[in-house]
Image: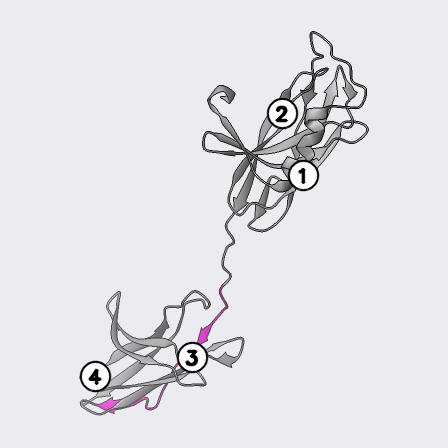
Amino acid sequence: MRKSLTRTVSGAAVAAVAVLALAGPANAAPVSPRVHTTLSIVQSRNHIKAGQADVISGRLASRGIGLGQHVVYLDRIAGKSLVAVQAKVTGPHGGVSFTVRPHVTARYELVYRGNATFEPTHSGIVTVRVIAPVPTRAHTTLSIVQSRNHIKAGQADVISGRLASHGIGLGKHVVFLDRIVGSLLVAVQAEVTGPHGGVSFTVRPGVTARYELVYRGNAAFDPTHSGIVTVRVIK
C-alpha cells in the first residue's frame, strides 16, 4: 500500500521538529548498511465521540533498545495520501505520544524517516472510530378529557388535553385528534398547543366514536399519545 501513498506535510510544528530529523542525533557517525529499526503503535481508546481525545503512542527501537532523541511523525491517511499532522522527539527510551481529536473516523500511522545511522521505518495503522452522538429527546406526556359523557346526534362534545414534559406544559407544538376506526387511527383534526400546553377539539360524531390525542414529537421531544375516550351518541 505504501508505494501508492504520497506524502504531504501540514503544520508549522511538524516543520520545526523536522530540523532534528535532518540533523540526526548528536555525534552520529554514518554506518553502511544502516541499522534496522522498528516502530510500534497503540491507541488509548477504540472509539470516541466527535471532539473527544484519543492518544496514539509508539516506541522507536533498534534490536530491542529504545532510540531516544529521534523525530517521529504522526501521519493521517487521507485517501491515497499520508498527511503529517504532528511530529515529536522520542523520549529517552524511544517512546512518543500524540493526542488527536478527529471529528470523523480517521486512520493514523507513525513514521520514522531515518538518518545516516538508522533505517527509516513505520508502524502499523490504527483507526480512531468516531461515533455519532445519539440525540436524547425529552420524555413527554399527553392527557385527555372529554366535557360530556354522552351526547345526542349532532350535538357537540369537547375533547381536551395537555402536552407536557417533566410537568412543564409545552406550547407551540402540534397535537392531532385521531379517531379510532376499527384497527386504524384516522387524524381528523390538528391544533397547536397554547402557552401552557393545552389543546381542545370540538367533535360532533353521528354515532358513538372513540378518540385519542397524538403528539408526533420532534428533534427535542419524544412522541407520545393520550389514553382513549369514547363519545357515546344516544338517540
Left or right of residue 121, residue 133 in this image: left
Q: Amino acid at mark 3?
A: Ser
Q: Amino acid at mark 4?
A: Pro
Front residue (pair 21, 194): 21
Residue with the mark numbered 2 = 123
* Earlier residue among tags 3 and 1: 1
Q: Can residue 190 be spotted in the picture?
A: yes
Front residue (pair 72, 157): 72
Front residue (pair 180, 191): 191
* Earlier residue among tags 1 and 2: 1
Give yes or no for contact between labels 4 and 3 (Cβ–Cβ under 8 Å).
Answer: no
* Earlier residue among tags 2 and 4: 2
Please tell me whether mark 3 sits on a helix, a strand or a loop: loop
Task: For marks 3 and 1, give the CA distance.
Answer: 55 Å
Label placed on residue 205: 4
- Comparing marks 2 and 4, which lies closer to the viewer? 2
Task: For marks 2 and 4, give the CA distance.
Answer: 75 Å
Task: For marks 4 and 1, give the CA distance.
Answer: 70 Å
As drawn, 17 above or below 231: above
Magenta segment: 137-152
Residue with the mark numbered 1 = 98
- Comparing marks 2 and 3, which lies closer to the viewer? 2
* Mark 3 nearby-residue class (10 Å; few <14, some 14–19, many ≥20): some
- Comparing marks 4 and 3, which lies closer to the viewer? 3
* Earlier residue among tags 2 and 3: 2
Give yes or no for contact between labels 1 and 2 (Cβ–Cβ under 8 Å).
Answer: no
As drawn, 86 above or below 3: below
